[in-house]
Image: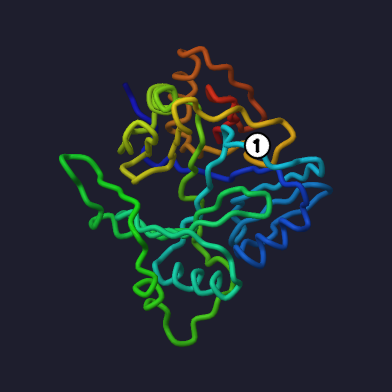
Amino acid sequence: MKKIHPETTIGAVSLTVSNLERSLAYYREIIGLQILSQQAGRAELGVGGQPLLVLTENRQAQPAGQPATGLYHFALLLPSRRDLAIALRHLAEKGEPLGASDHLVSEALYLNDPDENGIEIYADRPREQWPIHQGRLAMATNRLNFNGVLAEIQEGDKWQGLPAGTGMGHIHLRVADVGTAKHFYGEVVGFDHMVDYGDKATFYSAGGYHHHLGMNSWESTGASPRPADAPGLNYFEIVVPAAGRQAVLDRLAAHGVAVAQNGDRAIFTDPFAIEVHLI
């Protein structure tokens, strides 16, 4: 089976938030994104003119009381470890609660926005340093060496928001069943399987990247569907070069997945009612 084009990436992520002005302040002042456009109840943010995040306001939205299918976190990929160090120092100075991990292939910071949407900010290690174990990419969740990261800062470095070259590195989803997710995003959409964490998490990518998609199951019962009025994921974009787009559409059609066209977007939903935009 022909797989997805190797230059496929993840594009912008769209979220519902309960208070747009509060979220804009957070994403500008804490995360370091720039507002690219703003209308009543909606704003687009990014870096260097590149859209990365779309926020839509729903004043009635309340965080779900239990884990729900949809977003686990979206992940902003920084150009270098030095950029990660500058971001880490900034977040510490702001007093933001942080999680942090060394994944062997990358080093990452984790935090939540005011609506409890998960965010990862990370930098990759050089690809030639990614460990391979028994023919498979090896990843882990180890303690981050904070001092080692901060040592990358050079005299005169100042935080000025996220740097040029920042992109949407990957998206991590909550799903009700990992097996179903593996079939859909592997066999139907066409991503390559990279690695599993037991039977609770799986990681898929294009072009040998460590992962463009992560998918977690929440215990054996899975996660419940996200309530319609809860903050969280509206959709995410999969950016496929023109040469590989039709192959994805053909696989979706062959598996009976309904696709709606909206301009240059092909819109479909996965088995967990998560909306995906193919662009």
Going 22% across and 40% down the picture, which residue do you hit? 136
Front residue of 17 and 141: 141
**48 on left or right of 63:** left
Q: Which amino acid is tagged 1?
A: Asn
Q: Position of residue 208 (x, y in %)?
A: 31, 42
How packed is label 1: few (under 14 Cα within 10 Å), some, or many (20 or more)? some
> Residue pushed farthest left?
134
Residue 200 shown left or right of residue 45 in the figure? left
Nearest to the observer: residue 72 or residue 106:
72
- The single residue placed furthest to the bottom in the displayed view is 155
Q: Position of residue 189 (x, y in %)?
A: 44, 26
Query: Which residue appears at 61% of the width and 65% of the height?
Result: 32
Q: Is residue 236 left or right of residue 86?
A: right
Residue shown at the point (50%, 74%) measured from the top left: 89
269 to the left or right of 249: right
The image shows residue 256, relative to residue 99, as above or below, that is above
Q: Quadrant of the C terminus?
A: top right
The image quarter containing residue 212 is: top left
Q: Quadrant of residue 278?
A: top right
Q: Which type of secondary structure does the marked residue at label 1 adopt?
A: strand
Spot occupied by residue 100 in the image (x, y as percentages of width and height): 44, 60
Q: Is the residue 180 above or below the residue 29 in the image? A: above
Q: Which residue is mark 1?
A: 234
Residue found at x 50% / y 37%:
173
Quick check: 132 above or below 68?
below
Image spot of residue 166 (x, y percent): 50, 59
